[in-house]
Amino acid sequence: MSNIVRDSEVVELDAPPYFTFGEKVLAKRTVRNDGTYAGKEIGEVLCRKGEAGYVVSIGTFLQQFYIYGVEFTESGHRVGMKRKELELAVARDELEIPLPAELPA
């Protein structure tokens, strides 16, 4: 059996994903290639701390965590990240969502 180290005993999959498709997020740390990103050298920077990106996919890992596929606009890389590695670029209560115009009677 492999020696998988889990981050915590919390199972995120018991709740819906925290981030949604198209949501703008920021990287909370610099991420380097650990060998799983094809076409890049091990150790090469994939995204920098504070870099903005958009959630383009949502998957799972180890039946415990959501993994958010984030397309970073500056570097152009798509990186899979956990919730703890991301933060919202704009607080949800600050978003202005336009309401549909009223239909004529």
Image (cartoon, rainbow, N blue to C red):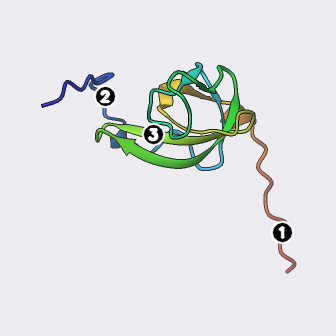
Label 2 sits on a secondary structure element that is loop
Nearer the observer: mark 1 or 3; the answer is: 3
In terms of sequence position, does the residue under pointer 1 or pointer 3 come before the other?
3
Residue 20 shown left or right of residue 102 in the figure: left
Query: Residue placed at 56% from the left, 23% from the top?
Result: 31
Q: Are the residues tagged 1 and 3 within 8 Å (C-beta)?
A: no
Give the alpha-carbon distance from disc 2 to disc 3, as whole Å: 14 Å
In the picture provided, is 84 more to the left or to the right than 73? left
Name the residue beneath numbered marker 2. 10
Mark 2 near mark 3, Cβ–Cβ under 8 Å? no
The residue wearing badge 1 is: 102
Residue shown at the point (75%, 33%) measured from the top left = 74
10 Å neighbourhood of mark 3: few (<14), some, or many (≥20)?
A: some
| Residue 67 numbered mark, or none | 3
Closer mark to the observer between disc 2 and disc 3: 3
First-in-chain label (2 vs 3)? 2
